[in-house]
Amino acid sequence: MDAEYFGAKLLLSYDIKEDMHQAYFQFMVGRYVPIVQAMGVRMNVAWHTAYGDYPERLIEFVASDRETMMALLENETWHALNEKLLEYVSNFSYKVIRYREEFQFF
């Protein structure tokens, strides 16, 4: 991880709705991730749960400082992106935590 990204981590978790995987992928790669990254918050890693009673996806975004992360969360574009994301996913939740290099979960 670059030293410049030792500020805050945003964890998104959710399940992809049945028969929405392709549309979800196109939305995430084509719109969600590029727009969030343009606001100064970089996607770090995406995890897929193959087994167990856990969310299907856990996505990590990182920012250089908490202020950048909070600016994202207060941005209307962020809210609109999440409204659109809800067309493709269920059980959506997110949490901002202090950045640590190891795997972090809710």
Image (tube, rainbow, N blue to C red):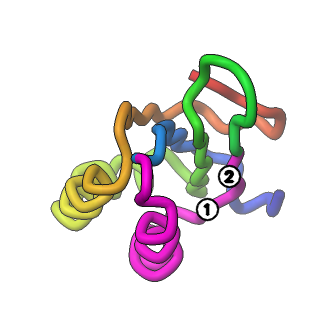
Q: Nearer the viewer, residue 61 or 92?
A: 92
Give the labeled residue for mark 1.
43
Residue at the image point whose x is 35% and y is 38% from the top: 90
Residue at the extreme top of the image, as rendered: 53
Magenta residues (range):
18-47
The kind of residue on which mark 2 rests is: Ala
Let me know if residue 38 appears in the view.
no
Which element type, helix, strand or loop, lies under badge 2? strand
Badge 1: how crowded within 10 Å, few (<14), some, or many (20+)? some
Asked which quadrant contains residue 19, the reply is: bottom left
User: Disc 2 and disc 1: Cα gap in Å?
Assistant: 8 Å
Q: Nearer the viewer, residue 104 or 50?
A: 50
Which element type, helix, strand or loop, lies under badge 1? strand
Asked if residue 71 is positioned above or below residue 92 in the image, the reply reads below
Give the labeled residue for mark 2.
46
The kind of residue on which mark 1 rests is: Met
